[in-house]
Image (cartoon, rainbow, N blue to C red):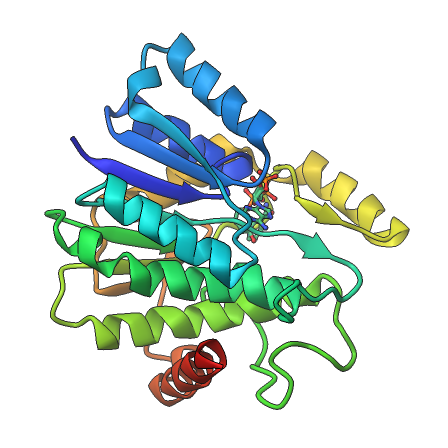
Amino acid sequence: MATAVITGGNDGIGRALADTYLERGHQVLVIGRDRGKGQAFLDAATGHGAGDRARFLQADLSLVTENKRALAWITRTYPSIDVLVLGARYHRSNRVETAEGFESNFALYYLSRFLLSHGLVGPLSRAPHPVILNFGGAGQTGPVRWDDLQLRRDYPGTGALGHSAKLCDLLGVSFIRIHHDTPVRYVLNHPGVVATSFAGEYDQATATQVERLKTIGKTTAQAVAQILPYLDDPPARLTAVLEGERVPTDTGAFDPAEATRLHEITRKLLAE
Ligand SMILES: NC(=O)c1ccc[n+]([C@@H]2O[C@H](COP(=O)([O-])OP(=O)(O)OC[C@H]3O[C@@H](n4cnc5c(N)ncnc54)[C@H](OP(=O)(O)O)[C@@H]3O)[C@@H](O)[C@H]2O)c1
């Protein structure tokens, strides 16, 4: 039976993908912090006769220790993984550091995805056609702040998500270079505006914008329909997709030298 592991699967696009893979007969693991939402996912799966294939793992993925705990549990539980979806995010209008001292978006949107991508390459490699979906910037975001990766100066609010998404693009580039001898394919997706929970803590002005985005965004079903073909049949080792359209990855946005630089900085940070 095929297996899908989905961070951010409690809400939004992640939840829609979890439901899609359950309907297809996969076993699906959703990872999130909120046990109530996790139980709602399990109850809905049971209601559709798929309760035996659905699991929820409670974890705060903004913490390195929690990612390591999740990795140990996942590798013990699933010998092979066909689909890994990296969708957990939490916007903050004001800069916050985790208990481990990392800027919160950097920790959840980038470091967690780094740890889970590289940490699950073993079980992914045992699947016939493994794929990772990371909601990166698909080349649409600005440059890396090399001298301030954790946004200590001029914290950009909503822009913090975009900065992490840029780091995820570079993560995809270095992942396929490092794991070139595995069958794992990496898809970076920018879905455009989608009406989801927009998990986060917003100042008043941003909260108003977010409420508006919820009224104009595409549905999660539309977002899933735009990305599924690339997950079912990834056209390259690394694919970037913007609202359903493939974008080139041989551009400066996916610079291999920058990707290597970020990989080395990240390894050092985690070693410390
Ligand atoms: N929606 C859009 O318009 C849009 C646009 C561009 C890119 N994207 C990207 O698409 C992906 C999915 O977004 P979405 O809008 O569908 O998500 P969403 O509705 O905002 O949900 C985010 C999920 O992340 C989980 N989460 C938050 N903090 C967590 C933590 N510390 N540890 C573990 N899980 C945590 C939440 O679950 P719990 O409450 O259980 O923790 C929630 O299920 C994200 O990467 C997002 O940046 C979305």
Residue 152: image location, x then y, percent = 73, 79
In the rendered image, is residue 140 in sight? no
Residue 160 position (above or below residue 149): above
Q: Looking at the image, can residue 9 be seen? A: yes
Instruction: Give the number of marks.
Output: 0
Hey, which quadrant is residue 26 in on the image? Answer: top left
Question: What is the x, y in percent for residue 67?
Answer: 45, 56
Image-based side of 235 in relation to 115, left or right: left
Left-right relation of 84 to 121? right
Residue at the image position 77 percent from the left and 41 percent from the top? 212
- Name the foreground residue: 102 vs 177: 102
- Which sits in the foreground, 52 or 242? 52
Task: Examine the rendered structure and indicate whether residue 1 appears above or below residue 46.
Answer: below
Residue at far right of view: 204
At 59% across and 26% down in the image, what residue appears? 36
Q: Residue at x 43, y 69 (%)?
A: 169
Left or right of residue 223, residue 229 in this image: left
Residue 150, how many percent across, how many down? 64, 76
Q: Is residue 177 left or right of residue 110?
A: left
Q: State the image coordinates of residue 48 (x, y, percent, origin top left).
A: 37, 11
For residue 20, above or below residue 75? above
Residue 199, image quadrant: top right
- Front-lying residue, 48 or 122: 122
Front-lying residue, 243 or 88: 88
Q: Quadrant of the N terminus?
A: top left
Q: Residue at x 30, y 39 (%)?
A: 4
